[in-house]
Amino acid sequence: MSFELPKLPYALNALEPHISQKTLEFHYGKHHQAYVNNLNNLIPGTKFENASLEVIVKEAEGAVFNNAAQIWNHTFYFNSFSPNGGGEPTGDLGHAIKQTFNSFAVFKENFTKASATLFGSGWTWLVKKPDGSLDIVQESNAGNPLHKGLTPILTCDVWEHAYYLDYQNRRPDYIESFWKLIDWELVGKRF
């Protein structure tokens, strides 16, 4: 099986001023594409040659996992955004967040803190655990909650390439803009 770079659900300039076209050209067009190219070069002749991306993320290790997870993570991340995003979740996800964290404000504060304090590169995730409860987890590098039996709901990419062109080393400013782009209707369907 050969993987391809998934299309974005919006134009490259649609997330401005929060994420610039230039950032998407590099982050999506170069970094995301590189993971696709790398995985396509790594899997021929392996047990993952005809596997789905999700199966590879759940079962692989090493370079195959890293590149597959980065494809999955980036696709999930980019598809969480809308030029008309922001606000708060409603419905079942909104209720679950309030039940778990007492309020959306507390959830947002905890998720923001987890994103801002993750050392080095990685991802912050809102996940659903097997018992149906929610949790916030930090994953270094290409870490993905599927690998641990958790269901991803939302993620924030805190690798510097996600924000450096727009925010330099100001990760908290990037995270603040992140909240203005989330398509809560789509994210809610993941719950």
Image (tube, helix red, strand yellow):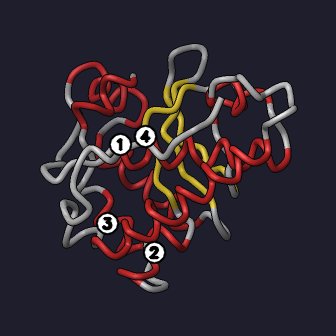
Q: Secondary structure at mark 2?
A: helix
Give the quarter of the image for residue 167: bottom left
Task: Quickly name the residue at label 1.
Answer: 79
Between circles 3 and 1, the one closer to the viewer is 1
The reply to whether callout 3 and callout 1 are in contact (CB within 8 Å) is no
Task: Report how far apart the C-alphas of labels 3 and 1 lie in the structure.
Answer: 18 Å
Q: Secondary structure at mark 4?
A: strand
Residue 60 location (% of width, % of height): 80, 34
- Please state which amino acid type lies under the numbered disc 2: Arg
Picture mark count: 4
Q: Earlier in the sequence, mark 1 or mark 2?
A: 1
Give the quarter of the image for residue 1: top right
Residue 176 location (% of width, % of height): 31, 66
- Please state which amino acid type lies under the numbered disc 1: Asn
- Please state which amino acid type lies under the numbered disc 3: Glu
Q: Earlier in the sequence, mark 2 or mark 4?
A: 4
Tell me if mark 4 has few (under 14), some (14-19) or many (20+) residues whose alpha carbon lies within 10 angstroms of its own. many
- Please state which amino acid type lies under the numbered disc 4: Leu
The reply to whether callout 2 and callout 4 are in contact (CB within 8 Å) is no
Q: Which residue is found at the position 72% from the left and 30% from the top?
A: 56
Task: Quickly name the residue at label 4.
Answer: 154
The reply to whether callout 4 and callout 3 are in contact (CB within 8 Å) is no
Q: Secondary structure at mark 1?
A: loop
Between circles 1 and 2, the one closer to the viewer is 1
Task: Quickly name the residue at label 2.
Answer: 171
